[in-house]
Amino acid sequence: MPKVIGIIGERHENFAPHSMLEKSLDWLKEKFRFEYQWVDTISISTNKNLLYGFSGLWSAPGSPFKSLNGALSAIQFARENNIPHLGTCAGFQHAIIEFARNILNIKEAQHEEYDSSSDFLFISKLACSLSGTSMEVKIRENTVTHNAYQRVKSTEDYYCQFGINPKFAEKLNHKEFLVSGIDQDGEIRIIEYPKLRYFVATLFVPQSRSTKENVHPLIRKLVEESIK
């Protein structure tokens, strides 16, 4: 039986990051034996046990999700069970919320798309939207992220309008949590849990840089770790 990677989120037919996500995985299916399956967040919120069938998880772009709790439950499941996990764009944003709620124990931590009046907006609307931009990311050496990239710089594409609220950025300094990629202004663009086998999240969408010959290294690494 091939291993199966769960794609967390609601699939949107005409949303480019979703089609690029699937295309990246389809190219890798020509080299590795695995399958993938979309899992909507409402299903997870009502039955978290369904996640046990997956050997890896990809928290996809496309927020707001139908169930914030479902999206967070999938991320928490991956983290607590050391399941290979990649979060991109919204997946990054929700990984920050899950960290704040369940590791920092700030249960009120919120994403502005779900509750703009919250006093604990760890994820807020960016002062300047990154949607449609490309920027260089500096990759920290001796990290899980660097092990995947095998280089210290990369140019990446963004589709997001939300990111880490500077008001709470300092709270991300934690022994279990690591910033492994920043942009030219020092803004956080990649995070990871260094003690886990592969838990990485990016504010950018790596799938947009994939080609059939060279699928993005973070995606390839997710697949490689998921099929072990």
Image (spheres, rainbow, N blue to C red):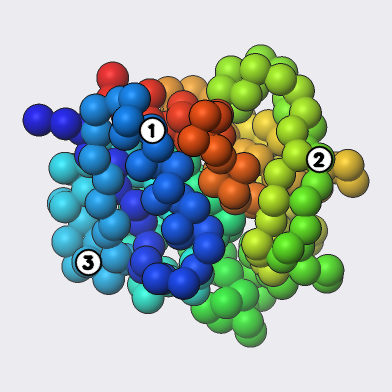
Q: Name the image quarter holding the N terminus.
A: top left
Q: In the rendered structure, are the residues bearing label 3 and label 2 in contact, judged by CB atoms less than 8 Å apart? A: no
Packing grade of label 1 (10 A; few <14, some 14-19, many >=20) is many
Report helix, strand or loop for mark 1: helix
Give the farthest residue toward the bottom: 117
Residue under the image location 22 percent in, 48 percent down = 51
Give the farthest residue toward the right: 185
User: Residue 209 at what x, y percent from top left?
Assistant: 62, 42
Residue 30 against residue 24 in the figure, above or below: above
| Callout in the foreground (3, 2) | 2
Give the farthest residue toward the left: 1
Packing grade of label 2 (10 A; few <14, some 14-19, many >=20) is some
Q: Mark 2 points at which residue?
A: 136
Say what amino acid the circle numbered 3 marks: Ser
Residue under the image location 71 percent in, 20 percent down = 151
N-terminal of the two: label 2 or label 1? 1
- Residue 166 in sight: yes
Q: Mark 3 points at which residue?
A: 43
N-terminal of the two: label 3 or label 1? 1
- What separation in Å lies between label 3 and label 2 (alpha carbons)? 37 Å
Q: In the rendered structure, are the residues bearing label 2 and label 1 in contact, judged by CB atoms less than 8 Å apart? A: no
Say what amino acid the circle numbered 1 marks: Leu
Q: Mark 1 points at which residue?
A: 28
